[in-house]
Image: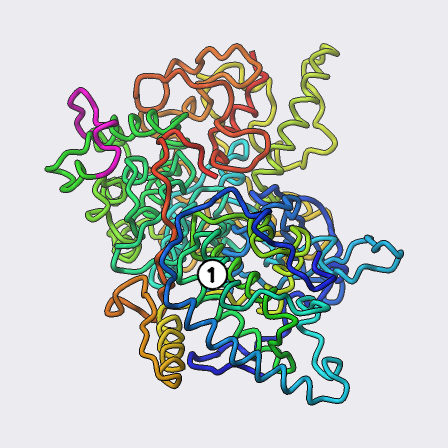
Amino acid sequence: MALTAPGQQLNLNESPSWGSRSVDCFEKLEQIGEGTYGQVYMAREIRTGEIVALKKIRMDNEREGFPITAIREIKILKKLHHENVIKLKEIVTSPGPEKDEQGRPDGNKYKGGIYMVFEYMDHDLTGLADRPGMRFSVPQIKCYMRQLLTGLHYCHVNQVLHRDIKGSNLLIDNEGNLKLADFGLARSFSNDHNANLTNRVITLWYRPPELLLGTTKYGPAVDMWSVGCIFAELLHGKPIFPGKDEPEQLNKIFELCGAPDEVNWPGVSKIPWYNNFKPTRPMKRRLREVFRHFDRHALELLERMLTLDPSQRISAKDALDAEYFWTDPLPCDPKSLPKYESSHEFQTKKKRQQQRQHDENAKRQKLQHPQQHGRIPPIQQSGQAHPQMRSGPNQPMHNSQPPVATGPSHHYGKPRGPAGGPGRYPPSGTSGGYNHPNRGGQGGGGYGSGPYPPQGRAPPYGSSGMTGAPRGGGSSGYGVGAPNYPQGAPYGSSGAGRGSNMMGGNRNQQYGWQQ
Amino acid sequence: MLASGKLTANSSRQPELIQPEPTTPRVLTILSTVIEKLVARNDRIVDGMSSGLTRLGKSLNAFHGVRAPSISIQKYLERLYKYTSCSPSCFVVGYVYIDRLLHKHPDSLVVSLNVHRLLVTSVLVASKMLDDEHHNNAFYARVGGVSNAELNKLEIEFLFLLDFGVMVSSRIFENYCLHLEKEMLLNGTLQKIERPIPSNSLDDVTEISVDDTHNSTSPSQVVD
């Protein structure tokens, strides 16, 4: 018997009811990630054979109860349905083995855990970009950027702020589709901008200046700053603002984008921490100068994304209308993109560790050319995985084509369509009648051109456990006085939290053993 | 545990956070009037059944105590408000949740044996949704007079019963406020519920936005 229904109850006939099925309907295949609130597994639904991702909700903090990030993510994903937003298929439970005092099953069907079931995605952007030898072509970057903006625009018109846009939260499947994921920090917003929101969101390197300055009234522009950071990172080949703490983060931003003042950002002096952080010396905007080698339209768009004043920053909708997406080379069709062997940041890290261990063993055995590690997928051979090939950070990269799928797709043997041999996805092929002069990855705005040659991809910083002395020609990128970068990546090994960054951290791991 | 049906909360176990008596938000008065009426009616229905509660559905089983707690609904709501200092909107949203739950599970009845647990759980979930600064389950358990473990179980049960439908748009929020006020009019009192935001800025898809306040912490604070 209901109370009354003044509001509409529209979602009464969803089916099946979430939580009605057990995780036993799925067979776990392997762990593919470690999220802020639990492990992520690749799994196969037994009945249909469909591959899914299972995200286990960590319930080990009794005092906190059901994690708030999980409730928020579920709540928001229930409402969002878009091809560029990850689809939450259902929630399943596991009763676990516990019995009550009398030895009966205690009837708590949630004891063994609660899992969110997502559609499976092969990669995340960080993992993909971080593959040895990976080069994104210009049409490919445009294609990813357009999908990112389309998904984000959808969120924003539905009044949802993502608040954690970064490479490892952008999932990519082997059809070339990009989807926004990890809505654990997301929330709804109202247009009046009078609500006080927490400024402790967004991974540091992608966090906009207004949040760093302590504002609590903000909107979709915060996500657009993160998009700008990712865009620049795709073009530049590494993170552009790798700050180690908030003050350094702001400083890096000011060094590239200039210092904020009442002229370029009306109202900035009223933001809570402005006076604590305002630069002591004049700093002018150097973005165009630093990235002068970028394609003109790319630079134009980047300028409008990395605008200090959030009210002047470009919206997702306007960004989609930017010249950049409508001039040659056009964004490619996602389906025309090469297929890559599965790569998640979690896996890439693990593989690197294995590789490193293997190489150390090999060194100890004084082998000049260590054999490929048995567990390293063959695809790595096409990149620069061989340590000996990279004698130093200044050695030019190979001019290798972007790796296309080699060999079998997934070891778990699910047919994922044609394996996509080189013939089917020619790296320099054209498709759909588009003219793709730069297809193949060496083109104009991609990495590897301009004054930031490949050594830029080698980390200028030592990694943890190493000497920590800057290598790589002392470059910290575009010459923001090389910071005293802390050893290793800014994130703990927990994998959680803010530092899970595109490219940067991993590369430290990747090359850290050299020298 | 509440197996005995007694709330263990009492003044000697109250959380340290003793505050000056705040003015009780009107929403609490309204809500307790409405819910007390409902519970009284449902209790009569159950009493009238030959087999009592066994004829009802099992959806709310987890929330049933053996005996009804002695604390009145009004006092219980005031207690929740006083010690958790959640925003008053949480009570409206908690009410929305309970109403949704009953719609989804038409065989369930709010009665004096389950109403307290439903209330503490619904306010807890609402506060998690609305307030960035909220007390944890352990705290709510102490205020609500249930064990931490039981409250956790109730929370999960509640979320699944709701099918995780915990989004409340500001339009729905406003509708429920109007409904609650109308109930009071029937009782002969005109009382307005405190709204978090001016209603002209309300918007269909917008969640109510009282919440999400933050502490002006030092900028070096780690993001969590």
Residue A349 x, y percent position in the rendering: 60, 32
Kindly tell me whether residue A153 is visible in this rendering: no
Based on the displayed image, in which of its 4 quarters is residue A437 positioned?
A: top left
The reply, left or right, for residue A49 in relation to residue B140 is right
Q: Is residue A159 magenta?
A: no
Query: Hey, which residue is sitting farthest front in the picture?
Result: B12
Chain ID at mark 1: B
Residue A374 x, y percent position in the rendering: 74, 31
Front in this rendered view, residue A118 or A187: A187
Which residue is tagged 1?
A: B78
Residue A10 x, y percent position in the rendering: 48, 79
Front in this rendered view, residue A68 or B20: B20
The reply, left or right, for residue A320 in relation to residue A430 is left
Residue A427 x, y percent position in the rendering: 49, 45
SS majority, magenta:
loop
Q: Is residue A272 magenta?
A: yes
Front in this rendered view, residue B219 or A497: B219
Callout 1: few (<14), some (14-19), or many (20+) C-alpha neighbours within 10 Å?
some
Residue found 59% across the figure and 20% down from its top: A387
Amino acid carrying label 1: it is: Glu
**What secondary structure is marked by label 1?**
helix
Q: Is residue A54 above or below residue A20?
A: above
The part of the chain drawn in magenta is: A271-285
Kindly tell me whether residue B6 is visible in this rendering: yes
Please identify the quadrant where the C terminus of chain A is shown.
Answer: top right
Residue found 50% across the figure and 14% down from its top: A392
Q: Is residue A18 above or below residue A66?
A: below
Number of numbered labels in the structure image:
1
Please identify the quadrant where the N terminus of chain A is shown.
Answer: bottom right
Residue found 69% across the figure and 57% down from its top: A415
